Structure formats: C-alpha cells, structure tokens
C-alpha cells in the first residue's frame, strides 16, 4: 500500500510538472502495458487496479501512451478513468505598446507668430504716426509687407527644385537632374556614371548621398545651386 501510494505521488508530480499530462486511474484488475498501440504487441508490464497513471499521449482514442516506472508503454483507454486534467498554461498578457507621439517642432510656428505680431505692431505704428506724411507711410508699409512676404516664403512655403542643373567647373559631379520631388539623378565625372539617389530639402540646403558621402547643395535661387564641401561648384539650371 505504501509503495503504491508513493508511486501515485511520483506519477502525479510527473504529470503536473514535467509534461503536464492528464492523470487517470486504472479500473481493470490488472491493466496490461504493451510495447506499441497495436493490441497484439508485446506486453512489457501491467498496472494494478486503482493505480494512478500519467497519460503522455491520448491522440489514439483506443490506446493511450502512458508513463510507468520502467519507461513508457500503451494501455487500453477502456480501462482508464480520468481523475485530473493537465494544468493549462496561462498565456502571458501582452502589454500594449503605446506608440510615442513624435514631438512636433513648433519653433518655426513660434518664430513666425512673433514676426507676425511685430509686423502688425509696426504697421499699426506706421498708420498712427505717419498719417501726415503719406509718402513715408506708404514706403514704410511696403517695406513691412515685403519683410513679411520673405518670412512667409522662407519659412512656410516648401521649397521645390525641378530641372537639370549643370556645372562648367572641374568638379566631381557634373550635373544634378531633379526629376521628382524625392529623387535626383547625378552624373559623376570621376567614375563616369549616372546614379539616382533620394534627397531632402532642409531650409535652403539640399542633402543627398552617394554611398557614404553626403552631398550638400545650397539653394541660391530657383536657377542656381552652390555645392558645399567636396561638391564645391556652381550649378545653373538649363
């Protein structure tokens, strides 16, 4: 009795901890344990009545694979009664990933707001104190409006470069052909090749790359680009 009790405890421990098997009790007086699930296969042992047994595989509804003290074998499921199910593993609850909102750079908006306030104050003072001098009032107002326009163009209107710019100087890059809003075709005179690369415009600078080299072009106006660094040259639009 003591031996069977400890054997049951061992099997229970195995079933709950190692492979999380279901636990069954034997109903037959003596349940044969066979080598395979074939009912005519070799009998390798037996399990006494009322013994607990850990079922390793119950996919075959007629013969279960079980764990016994001297190994593993197969028994008829007809003579087994289920007494405990394998504990289900709790699926860890995934913590929601909260996307960090990109911090928007409001420096340009703040600057433009301050400029707008200053220009409005200047216009107010011009109309208030120069009413008697119409000519000076108009000239001052025009200057303020021009300043406001250039601030708007420089900080609000997104720069867009199109067309082909070429250089007549002896530089590594002979031409820059801006065919779309985000790609430029560059003629490299040193290796005599054409390659296309993405580019970005930051303020008045065009930035693009050839392998590890960063190519910088300053936008002087709509028809003139000035190369910086090893790209030093003046490029005119055709």
Image (cartoon, rainbow, N blue to C red):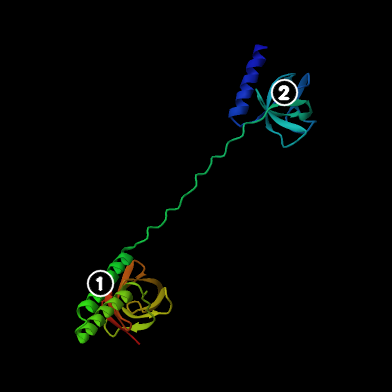
Q: Residue at x 77, y 20 (%)?
A: 30
Query: Which residue is tagged 2?
Result: 25
Asked where in the image residue 20 lies, by quadrant, the reply is top right
The answer to whether residue 74 is above or below residue 140 is above
Give the numbered dot on residue 202: none
First in residue order: circle 2 vs circle 1: 2
Q: Secondary structure at mark 1?
A: helix
**Residue 154: x percent and y percent?**
31, 74
Are there few (<14), some (14-19), or many (20+) residues within 10 Å of tag 2? many
Q: Secondary structure at mark 2?
A: strand
In what quadrant of the picture does the N terminus appear?
A: top right
Q: Is residue 28 left or right of 19 when viewed as pictured?
A: right
Q: Position of residue 162 (x, y in %)?
A: 39, 81
Residue 162 visible in the current orientation: yes
Q: Does residue 164 lie above or below 84 as drawn?
A: below
Query: Which disc number belongs to residue 121?
Result: 1
> Which label lies toward us, 2 or 1?
1
* Residue under the point 65% across and 15% down: 5
């Amino acid at each position: 009795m003591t031996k069977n009790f400890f054997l049951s405890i061992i099997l229970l421990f195995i079933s709950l901890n190692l492979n999380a098997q279901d636990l069954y009790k034997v109903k037959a007086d003596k349940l044969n344990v066979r080598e395979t699930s074939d009912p005519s296969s070799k009998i390798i042992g037996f399990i006494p009545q009322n013994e607990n047994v850990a079922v390793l595989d119950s996919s075959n509804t007629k013969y279960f694979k079980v764990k016994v003290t001297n190994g593993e074998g197969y028994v008829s499921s007809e003579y087994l009664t289920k007494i405990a199910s394998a504990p289900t593993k709790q699926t860890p609850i995934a913590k929601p990933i909260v996307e960090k909102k990109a911090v928007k750079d409001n420096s340009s908006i703040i600057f433009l707001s301050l400029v707008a306030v200053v220009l409005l104050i200047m216009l107010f003072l011009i109309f208030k104190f120069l009413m008697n001098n119409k000519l000076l009032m108009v000239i001052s107002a025009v200057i303020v409006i021009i300043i406001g326009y250039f601030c708007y163009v420089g900080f609000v209107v997104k720069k867009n470069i199109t067309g082909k710019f070429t250089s007549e100087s002896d530089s590594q890059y002979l031409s820059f052909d801006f065919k779309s809003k985000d790609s430029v075709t560059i003629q490299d005179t040193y290796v005599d090749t054409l390659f296309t690369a993405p580019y970005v415009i930051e303020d008045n600078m065009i930035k693009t790359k050839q392998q590890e080299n960063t190519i910088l072009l300053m936008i002087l106006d709509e028809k003139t680009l000035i190369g910086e660094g090893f790209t030093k040259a003046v490029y005119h639009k055709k």
